[in-house]
Amino acid sequence: DVKVTQSSRYLVKRTGEKVFLECVQDMDHENMFWYRQDPGLGLRLIYFSYDVKMKEKGDIPEGYSVSREKKERFSLILESASTNQTSMYLCASTPGGETYNEQFFGPGTRLTVL
Amino acid sequence: AQSVSQHNHHVILSEAASLELGCNYSYGGTVNLFWYVQYPGQHLQLLLKYFSGDPLVKGIKGFEAEFIKSKFSFNLRKPSVQWSDTAEYFCAVIKKRTDKLIFGTGTRLQVFP
C-alpha cells in the first residue's frame, strides 16, 4: 500500500527557530513535493524535487529551503521561523516520467509559530 | 498567470440533494485534470482524474466530472450526496510537459442529514 509519512502531525515553534519537517515515502517515487495549505488559498507549492540532490522552486519558496539526500526522504527547512509561516504543510510524491499521474499525500504537519 | 478557479467556496446541502462544484482553469494546450478530496482529519486523496478519452469520468463514491474543453471547465457532480461526503474538495490541473500541479482554492462541502 502506498504510504507517505510526515514526522509530526502537530508542531509548535517560536519565532526565529530553525524548523525541520521530514517526509518519507516508501514507493520508490522520483518526485517529491512540499505544499502549504491555508484556508481560502488552497494548496501552494513551496519546493519540489525530481531526484536525489535536485530541487526546484515552487510558487512560494521564500523563507524555505529543502534537502533531498536520499530518494525516499524530502525535508523542508524553515531557516528562521516567522508567524506568517503558521500553516498546514503537506508532502506528496509521484512516480517520475513524462506521463503525470496522481500525487500521493502525507497526513500533513500543522505548524504553529508563536 | 496560470490559475484554477473554484467559484463555490462553501456549499451546504441536505442529504439526497444533487451536487455540482465548478472548476475552471486558464491554460491553453493539453492538460491533465484532477479532483482531490480531504475528509475531516484525513489525507488528501484522489477522487477522479482526466487524462484523455471520454470527457465524462467516473470516480470513487459515485462522483463524476465532465471535461468541457471549450469552456476550460472540469465540474464535479454527484446526483445524491450523503452526510459522509462532508469534506473539502480541490480541483487541480497540470499542463503537459510541466510537473507543477496547480490547485484551486477548494470548496468546503457540508451535508446535513
Image: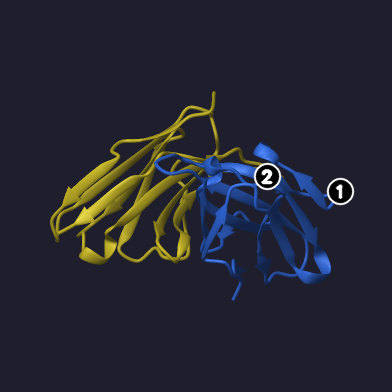
Chain colours: A yellow, B blue
**Circle 2 SS class:** strand
Residue B40 % position (x, y): 43, 44
What residue sits right under mark 1 in the picture?
A: B53
Which comes sooner in the sequence, label 1 or label 2? 2
Identify the residue at horizontal 53%, vertical 28% (top origin): A2
Looking at the image, residue A50 sits to the left or right of residue A69; the answer is: right
Residue A10 % position (x, y): 25, 43
Marking on residue A65: none
The chain letter under disc 2 is B
Which is more toward the observer, A23 or A8?
Answer: A8
Q: Can residue B16 be spotted in the picture? A: yes
What residue sits right under mark 2 in the picture?
A: B48
Which is more toward the observer, A82 or A75?
Answer: A82
What's the residue type where badge 1 is placed? Gly
Looking at the image, residue A105 sits to the left or right of residue B48; the answer is: left
What's the residue type where badge 2 is placed? Leu
Query: Circle 1: is it few (<14), some (14-19), or many (20+) Cα within 10 Å?
Result: few
Identify the residue at horizontal 56%, vertical 56% (top origin): B13
**Farthest top residue?**
A1
**For the residues bearing labels 1 and 2, Cβ distance under 8 angstroms:** no
Q: How far apart are marks 1 and 2 (CA)?
A: 14 Å
Task: Relative to A35, say whether B70 is above or below.
Answer: below
Q: Nearer the viewer, mark 1 or mark 2?
A: 2
Which is more toward the observer, A12 or A21?
Answer: A12
Residue B3 % position (x, y): 60, 70
Identify the residue at horizontal 83%, vertical 70% (top origin): B70
Residue B14 % position (x, y): 57, 52
Identify the residue at horizontal 35%, vertical 66% (top origin): A62
Task: Relative to A103, say whether B72 is above or below.
Answer: below
Task: Relative to A75, say whether B32 is above or below.
Answer: below
Query: Circle 2: is it few (<14), some (14-19), or many (20+) Cα within 10 Å?
Result: many
The chain letter under disc 1 is B
